[in-house]
Image: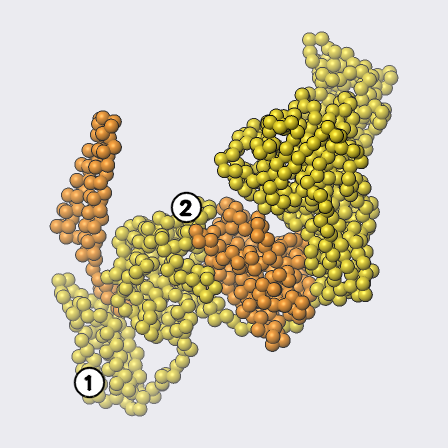
Chain colours: A yellow, B orange
Amino acid sequence: MLISLNWIKKYVDIDIDNDELVKLIGSRLVEVEDAIDQTHKYDKIYAVEVKYCEAIEGTHLHLCKIDDGGRADKVERDENGYVQVMCGAPNVRKGMFAAWIAPGAIVPASVHEDAPFVIGMRKMLKKYDSYGMMAGADELDLGDDHTGIVELNPATTKAGDDFAQLFELDDIILDIENKSLTHRPDTFGIIGFAREVAGILGKPFKTPDWYLATKASFENSKDIQVDIEISDSQLCPRYVALVMEPHGKAEHKYLSFRDTLLARSGMRPIDPIVDASNYLMLLSGQPTHTFDYDKFIAVGGTKTPKIGVRLAKKGEKLVLLDGKEVELVESDIVIASNDTPVALAGAMGGKDTEIDENTKRVIVESATFSLFNLRKTQMNHGIFSEAITRFTKGQPSAQTLPVALEFANEVDGLMRPVAVFDSQKTAPKAEKVTVSVARINGLLGTNYSIDEIVKTLQNVEFTVEQKDDSIVCTAPQWRTDIHIAEDIIEEIGRLNGYDNISPILPLHGTADADPCFALRRHIRDFAASRGANEVLTYSFVHGDLMRKVGQNPDNAYRIVNSISPDLQYIRQTIVPSLLDKSYANMRGGYEKFALFEMNQTYPRTNGLDEQNVPNGSHSLALICVGKGGSNYYLAKKYLEQLLASLGIEFEIAPFVAVADKTNAYYEPKRSASIIVDGVRIGDLGELKAKVAREFKLPLNTAAFELDLGRVLESQQAVTRKNFRISQYPFVMRDITLELPIERPYGEIEQQLRATLEAEQLIYRLKATSIFRAEGETQKKISFHIEFSHPDRTLAKTEIQVIMEKLEQVK
Amino acid sequence: MSSNAESKIAELKAQLKQLNIEYSKIKDIPAEQRADFGKKLNLEKQKLMAEIAAAEEAAAEVDVEALDITAPCDINGEMPEFLAADSGSKHPLMTELDRVADIYRSMGFDVVESRQLDDEFHMFDSLNFAPGHPARDNFDTFRTEEGYIPPAHTSTMQNRVLQRFKYKLDQGENIAVAIPGRVYRNEDLDATHEHTFYQCEGVYVSKDCTLGNMLGILREFFEKYYGQKLNIATQPGYFPFTEPSLEFKIEKPACIGGKKGDFLEMLGCGMIHPNVLKQAGIDPTKYQGFAWGGGIDRLVMLRYQLSDVRFFESAKLDFLKEFSC
């Protein structure tokens, strides 16, 4: 939203400089995205009188001599002091007043371009000197009209007047971030914005009388009857219809102050009716729409207008003003003439009731609609006009009648009001809010006196009564957002400046670490310090990703309004996401790597929790990819050492494919379940060949995924209670056991340990190789063993007995 | 794969190829017979494809050699070694979240992680959003078929933490909780917009805490975070769940290239709306509080002067290794 500070100044005295004002507005009302300085945009542009005008035959040009009051320098003047300028506009003529861009001035429309256009002296048709330029509305950045030059009203213009001064164009334009005013419909009009500025500056504001009108100053014509039928007052809290008829003739069109205000606010002057509507919308926040009266009743087939406001019906269509036919949605509010839709409420009028050059009587609509429905209309039909932007903030219904009546004033001379109809029979009662001074200061951390508080509110036209140490406030009719004490407290804090409140740190202790955070931090440190890379990947995945790994998308929550199919399902496990990200890294030149992620997963098969929301799991997934031996055993090493570091006793057990298919990507013959206290807490394994191929990954790719909730439950303090130091020498031996190929290594190691422990030995045991010769059915496992007795030096015979026992393990 | 299974699969595939050739003849068949012809061939084709899949599956299973899941290494293989420590890395967002959590903890805040799938009640109803509020519609917020919501803000946890910690109020203590977590917004992806990002929420409730206290806590947090004194500023804001609502800004710290008068918007905040306290069973006439929420991704981008938010979820080692231990 663009706000002209000069327009604001029409309603409030501002006695601080612009920079300071912009800063105050930013800190006490709304984010100012940009303050566009236009104070020099119209420099060296003068009002001039055309003293001489001669058409050059065979061209569209006129040779003109203009009186600039002697203002311009760097020009040649004739004996009368006039300057010669050529002009191609068809409306140029002797005696008119025009805006002249003097040599050396920048064409205003090009001010914000990279290379602003500077006017100088030009030689035209090879012989005529032409100084400067007589400007059209488009060149002045005051309109789109390029059919002629702007005309200035001779009654209010002298030759040599500064153009900027005539229209108060030395302005600052504030570019406002609309979003932060979502809850303040009143500030979407200049009056409301100016009121806030007054409040911020600590000055009382006075709303113009017309805005407070509660009835028309004219009597309704007996010949006119308009029926308004609203199907649901939630959809349309108030509908005012003003009927006007032609009266007077269009005056000669001079550039007006109002035209420049429209232009400064980002709109364009178009015609008297549209301009009046736009001007009042910018001023008050209240949009209006004008129907052709006769077309309106023709569409409805009625003698007098029967205006209906209702929801659209399924399948209904409407051709809008822009010529597009839209299929209406059932949340759209339509204006109907005797039940035939003629306008999409709040968004756009219909073609069938559009005003045109033959229009006689008009119906001016000034109404409020459900902002929720209009928001849907806006999104469904892609209409983002200035009007609907204001409507979707929920404009106060109190202003509908005054704006309709003021509309009549704005088009005075062209049309006159004959009757006005209002759907609202009794005005809603104003709410009163009571709040104590102690409560205000107690919530803000301030020390405002009751007088300061009362004045703050009165400045922005609250009615305030003092009652002991409390105030009883009645919000003005445009403040539909004031309901509770906190709303009043906000006004006090904000208008006086939150930045004037002292930040005070309350006393505090320290809090304990959350065990889940501590666990994840431990894992993060553990894995990263062992060469693995932590990643984050999306929670949302493509259904195809699940299908590729053998998961069932029906077991995943599906997003109905996903951005793309890539992001349609909530993932059930993390490993598939890591598979998906691995190939790109291989192709990026990384030959061997381990990726890990800790995140939440929500498989549908987890069911709901006690609050009836989906049960999530915290998971850790790690994948090992690349050359150099089996990644299964590398992943296993990460897993085993991690669990050991957490004091968790676990078992690597044969793989179990679970019924919900969440672990369907592991190759059962080359994977394992991780079991703690008889419960599976995760899986470890190589991928099925098919899955590896889908992701272009080597067959030796392996991964594991653990339920961190279970890990947390199983976590034990790591103790060293069995740790002993031997005073006696260690015996070092290597042994090799020959075993059937299918004999699990784990059991062998278990037996060796049991044997050593049975002997009460302090020992260190490490497998050094597992070997199988070509064609053999046996494998050879070699161990390096170091042991010592805590109480004595082991005798040779003892050692021999121990070794024999160890060698018997099979 | 046994040669037997292999030849069986090859044979089935040859049949499929033949069937496809048959299919291409459809254009020569009289129009009225095409539908039947197509249907018949389709049925055959589906049957064949199922057979091929089954044969392949069976062959694959037979083919797989079991490995000893309990061993430390492969038969005839080398003992695995961890990857080089200096190639490992922690995700910068996670490191930052840990730091943020540490600072809040040192300031007495319990830290609770936010959920990643929630419902209408926690996302909106409990936070005083009006029934038809635009934020609820599908243009901003994702929903599952069942109507669950991947939360668009960590505020979705406010009601839960208020309920969980309100016992502290009865004990004469304060509620002070920080809630980091992953959130989602229906936004198109570009260098500065992610649909998946991280936020941290703060909730504080006591008998008499003030807006001034909120500013004090926030300033303290950012001063600890940046390790220097900071100027702060505010701007009025609007959130249904706080009243008054503010945007909180800090003067951009020198360590990330700040100049005087250069303010950064860090988060939205405000005094908790009485309806939010009521929804959590806390009497707003006895207790008052404040809450805030801000993005983490931006903190990390500012700290490392990253140009593109999409790096975070890219899982690209080129990026990750920039953060090696």
Residue ID at (21%, 50%): B54
Residue ID at (19%, 33%): B22
Residue ID at (39%, 52%): A581
Amino acid type, callout 2: Pro
- Identify the disc placed on residue A800: 1
From the top left corner, tell me how far across and down residue A301 is, in percent.
Answer: 60, 27
Amino acid type, callout 1: Gln
> Which chain contains the residue that carries disc 1?
A
Identity of the residue furthest to the bottom in this view: A791
**Is A293 positioned to the left or the right of A533 in the image?**
right
From the top left corner, tell me how far across and down residue A807 is, in percent.
Answer: 18, 79
For the residues bearing labels 2 and 1, Cβ distance under 8 angstroms: no
Figure quadrant of residue B124: bottom right
Task: From this view, report whether residue B309 is shown above or below residue A239.
Answer: below
Mark-to-mark CA distance, 2 and 1:
68 Å
From the top left corner, tell me how far across and down residue A16 is, in percent.
Answer: 81, 48
From the top left corner, tell me how far across and down residue A750 is, in percent.
Answer: 26, 76
**Is A80 positioned to the left or the right of A613 in the image?**
right
Instruction: Point out the tag, 2 or 1, that comes first from the N-terminus.
Output: 2
Task: From this view, report whether residue A132 is shown above or below residue B304.
Answer: above
